[in-house]
Image: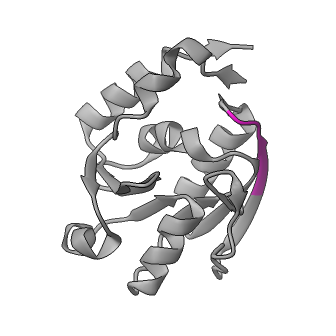
Amino acid sequence: MLRLPEAHRDLFKKPFGTLYTSVDELLPRLEGRAVYAVGDVVTHNLLAAGVVPDIAIIDGYTMRTPCNRSPLLRARRLTVKNPPGTITGELTDAIDEAVRGQPAVIFVDGEEDLAVIPLVLAAPDGAAVLYGQPAEGVVLRLVDTAAKQEAASMLSIFVRE
């Protein structure tokens, strides 16, 4: 398991991609791409806009309170444990499996906030990874070599336990 040290948590408050105020604003950027969503609200908003994500990673919460908008997707469901502030091997294995066999929903018992990092690393070039930026909107990261390098750099900050 990898744990994000408390001293480095502020580094992860900056968007890891382009921040949009709403999903509707970024819809044209999703055309023809695999769409991967991290978070219940982002997934819900994509579905409301008519976009079914190829992979959704959800935990049933938004901003640490139960989310009544957890989406019901007709896709293979993988369930993993991932405590807050961590990236477990179980989560990364599920992400790898989901990328190989889409569509899929990964339901996280714990917290999915940091899943965007291994998701970008596992995603094919050209995929669109979206996640919520609390109280600001939605972040879109198009996967390319630079995105993978930045994700690997972010992952290097974590401590193996």
- How many discs mark residues in the rendered view? 0
- Residue 146 placement (x, y as % from top left): 24, 32
**Viewer-side residue, 144 vs 48:** 48
Q: Is residue 107 above or below residue 28?
A: above
- Residue 161 placement (x, y as % from top left): 75, 14
- Residue 12 placement (x, y as % from top left): 44, 30
Q: Is residue 61 left or right of residue 55?
A: right
**Viewer-side residue, 77 vs 81:** 81
Magenta stretch: residue 116 in it? Answer: no
Stretch of the chain drawn in magenta: 79-84
Q: Is residue 76 above or below residue 128?
A: below
Residue 129 visible? The answer is yes
Q: Residue at x 43, y 75 (%)?
A: 46
Q: Residue at x 45, y 85 (%)?
A: 48
Task: Determine the image quadrant of residue 135.
Answer: bottom left
Q: Residue furthest front?
A: 135
The colour mode here is one colour
Name the dominant secondary structure of the magenta segment.
strand
Q: Residue at x 37, y 65 (%)?
A: 34
Q: Is residue 149 left or right of residue 93?
A: left
Q: Is residue 70 above or below residue 98?
A: below
Q: Is residue 64 left or right of residue 79?
A: left
Residue 54 visible? The answer is no
Q: Residue at x 33, y 27 (%)?
A: 150
Location of the N terminus by quadrant is: top right
